[in-house]
């Protein structure tokens, strides 16, 4: 196998020198497999396995990427990577005793080198589907047998909410595999007892054999519904239609995954990730005002947005005459009423009059510059305003934005936003509020950050 790679390198280098053009040093394809398109996420791994005789496919023209891998097949892959050692192997398991079976040499070699140990009843079960934790454990033992560095921190699994599902025999192997980036999670979860497809198994082998670069994200030490730093971490946020858009916006601004998740958990807690959300508690107070105040007729969130947008919104404070100057035109009156009603609004539930005034002004200018109709409930405009406050206001920049750049913990990131940006009334510093928001933030980290 090594000679084959050297020949490929040498031939490509000669072509490069003769033609004087940029060409890949190794040009491989998944041919002749018709079910492995060039743009498939597993194409590179399958091409590598085919070129190095690790797999010959399920037929002459198919690879069957979605077929489940058996225990015998995966050990055969490892045996071929090791260049098929034999050394007079004898049967180790009663169900792997036929020398003519394709996996006989591989399984008995793996047993002789400590890569597999079989089940308690003495069998190996070569035709059973392999699980993700079995796959990681076999690869871990394979690396150990070859003298590779197998160290991994005990916290390597902490960022996965289902780490407790890993079987005791597989913990060490799963820690190593996730730390090396061989196993990277599926939808943010380990799924240790799920089966693996042929495409998945060869992708993991490719990552190991080629030592593909991977920087594991720092472990957060947090799981849902567990104690962390004296805080009971809550449950996940309910997915919304805006989640991916908000995540992409924050990451595109250079935030790391912890910081983005900490912000999103708080946005979800404030508004359910809705830019047209109205603070229900304060809204009720306006509809049932104190003596001397004027009640506002009940409105839906959509109705509130509509009257602010069209300039017909009016709100008067009889107890605060200085705030009753609504303006000389409908737009100004609507802006002042929106700013002065103290109703929390939008993604971040902005409430304080100066911030609402700024939000209205910047949102209108934003739409005017684009030449589109004004909408106070615009998701992108609110994200831009949020980012403007976070990065330009001296307090928010110093106490929130700059510390977020270096955080490596979901709870820390969530609390920075909670304490110093959102700053909800009264009980925000109590652990229940911290844990609830950290739980929301953790769900975003698990979905998008790993």
Image: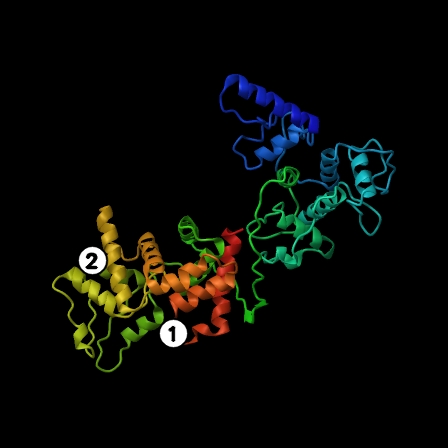
Decide: is 287 above or below 199: below
Q: Secondary structure at mark 1?
A: loop
Where the N terminus falls, by quadrant? Answer: top right
Dot label at residue 310? 2
**Residue 96 left/right relative to 398:** right
Closer to us: 20 or 168:
20
Q: Earlier in the sequence, mark 1 or mark 2?
A: 2
Based on the displayed image, in which of its 4 quarters is residue 306 positioned? Answer: bottom left
Give me the C-alpha separation between circle 1 and circle 2.
31 Å
Residue 345: x and y in percent read 32, 64
Residue 60: x and y in percent read 66, 25
**Residue 269 left/right relative to 146:** left
Decide: is 123 above or below 11: below
**Residue 320 left/right relative to 204:** left
Residue 184: x and y in percent read 59, 48
Decide: is 87 above or below 123: above
Decide: is 23 above or below 282: above
Closer to us: 39 or 5:
5
Label 2 near label 1: C-beta < 8 Å? no
């Amino acid at each position: 196998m090594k000679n084959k790679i050297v020949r490929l390198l040498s031939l490509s280098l000669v072509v490069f020198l003769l033609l004087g053009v940029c060409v890949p040093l190794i040009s491989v394809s998944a041919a002749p497999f018709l079910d492995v398109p060039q743009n498939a996420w597993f194409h590179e791994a399958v091409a590598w396995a085919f070129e190095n005789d690790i797999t010959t496919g399920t037929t002459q023209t198919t690879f069957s990427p979605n077929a489940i891998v058996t225990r015998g097949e995966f050990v055969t892959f490892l045996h071929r990577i090791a260049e098929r050692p034999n050394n007079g192997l004898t049967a180790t398991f009663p169900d792997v005793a036929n020398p003519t079976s394709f996996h006989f040499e591989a399984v008995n070699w793996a047993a002789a080198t400590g890569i597999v140990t079989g089940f308690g009843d003495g069998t190996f079960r070569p035709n059973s589907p392999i699980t993700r934790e079995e796959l990681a454990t076999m690869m871990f033992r394979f690396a150990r047998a070859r003298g590779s560095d197998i160290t991994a921190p005990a916290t390597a699994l902490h960022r996965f909410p289902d780490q407790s599902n890993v079987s005791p025999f597989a913990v060490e192997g799963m820690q190593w595999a996730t730390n090396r980036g061989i196993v990277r999670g599926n939808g943010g979860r380990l799924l240790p007892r799920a089966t693996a497809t042929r495409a998945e198994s060869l992708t993991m082998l490719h990552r190991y054999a080629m030592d593909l670069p991977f920087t594991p994200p720092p472990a957060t030490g947090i799981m849902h519904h567990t104690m962390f730093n004296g805080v009971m971490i809550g449950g996940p946020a309910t997915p919304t239609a805006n989640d991916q858009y908000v995540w992409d916006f924050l990451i595109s601004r250079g935030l790391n995954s912890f910081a983005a998740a900490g912000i999103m958990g708080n946005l979800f807690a404030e508004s359910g990730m809705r830019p047209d959300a109205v603070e229900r508690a304060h809204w009720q107070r306006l509809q049932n005002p104190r003596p001397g105040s004027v009640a506002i007729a009940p409105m839906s969130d959509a109705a509130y947005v509509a009257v602010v947008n069209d300039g017909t919104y009016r709100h008067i404070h009889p107890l605060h005459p200085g705030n009753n100057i609504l303006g000389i035109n409908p737009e100004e009156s609507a802006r002042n009423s929106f700013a002065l009603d103290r109703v929390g609004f939008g993604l971040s539930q902005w409430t304080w009059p100066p911030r609402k005034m700024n939000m209205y002004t910047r949102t209108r200018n934003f739409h005017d510059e684009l030449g589109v109709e004004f909408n106070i409930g615009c998701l992108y405009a609110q994200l831009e305003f949020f980012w403007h406050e976070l990065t330009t206001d001296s307090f928010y920049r110093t106490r929130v934005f700059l510390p977020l750049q270096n955080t490596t913990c979901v709870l820390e990131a969530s609390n920075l936003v909670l304490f110093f940006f959102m700053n909800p009334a009264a009980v925000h510093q109590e652990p229940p509020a911290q844990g609830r928001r950290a739980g929301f933030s953790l769900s975003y980290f698990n979905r998008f950050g790993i």
